[in-house]
Amino acid sequence: MIAATDIGHVRAVNEDSLRVIPSINLAVVADGMGGHKAGDIASRTAVNSLCEHFQEQVLINDALGDQGTMDVMADAFALANSQVFTNSHQFSNCEGMGTTLISASCQPEQIQFGHIGDSRAYRFCRGHIEQLTIDHTLATELSVDTPEWELPAYSHHVLRKALGIESSCTPDFFTVKPENSEIFLLCSDGLTGVLKDEEISTILALRSHQPEHCLQTLIDACLDGGAPDNISIILIYVSGN
């Protein structure tokens, strides 16, 4: 697992948070809600809460197992939501804050994901890229009856789900069985708002054998494209099963 974040060209503060913990094979990305107070605090709180819960449970249980890991992830999302929600109501400087959150727990035979908001997970293999997550946005809702080219631009930035906005949350959880030589990518919308899937796929195909160079090339491409938002990326390389 390798990770990087960049503030971009426009934002005054990096409201993204990310972390990889190789010892428990956990990767997490959060994007504090733009336009809200304390987005950086929200994303950092969510990431810290989720990671701390995972680490505590691994220490207690040694090996969680597949179902155990998914249960821990569901509990971790609930705890992170509660922490962000509580802080937003207790502290005036945190009022109205929220965040996206996406996590991947890599087990020997499968990768388990948790997701809320519009940060994304992708799967890349043999030149093909697949978006694994569904954006929790107004655009996603409208796209059921409206062609992509007719969707209002703002609809892609209106979140229908986020962490910390309500006292409870309903994330998506799913499991993927990885194959040898696949790459999984977690990112904030600072990447996908600038680069199309095909552009991301091209960079992964050309630079996949050089992980650090691949990561930097993705960020540089966003910066060259104007980078109006913070950019956060985690690459997970599958070497074998």
Image (cartoon, rainbow, N blue to C red):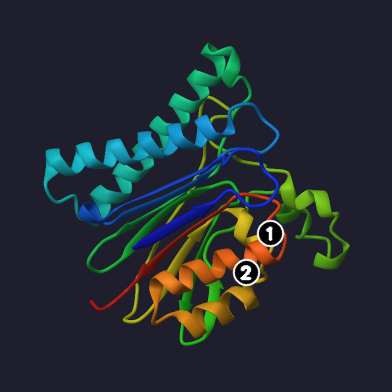
Q: Is residue 128 left or right of residue 174?
A: right
Q: What's the residue at 39%, 73% (across, down)? A: 211
Classify mark 1: residues with Cα within 10 Å, few (<14), some (14-19) or many (20+).
some
Q: Is residue 241 left or right of residue 139?
A: left
Identify the mark at residue 158; answer none if there is no mark: none
Q: What's the residue at 23%, 76% (across, down)? A: 241
Say what amino acid the circle numbered 2 marks.
Ala
- Pinpoint residue 168: horizontal percent, then vertical percent: 51, 29
Q: Nearer the viewer, residue 5 or 200?
A: 5
Q: What's the residue at 88%, 62% (across, down)? A: 150
* SS assignment at label 2: helix
Residue underneath mark 1: 193
Q: As displayed, is residue 137 above or below residue 199?
A: above
Identify the residue at the far bottom of this view.
126
Q: Quadrant of the N terminus?
A: bottom left
Residue underneath mark 2: 221
Q: What's the residue at 67%, 38% (across, down)? A: 34
- Pinpoint residue 8: horizontal percent, then vertical percent: 63, 52
- Pinpoint residue 223: horizontal percent, then vertical percent: 65, 62
Q: As displayed, is residue 47 above or below residue 111?
A: above
Classify mark 2: residues with Cα within 10 Å, few (<14), some (14-19) or many (20+).
some
Distance Cα–Cα, label 1 vs label 2 = 12 Å
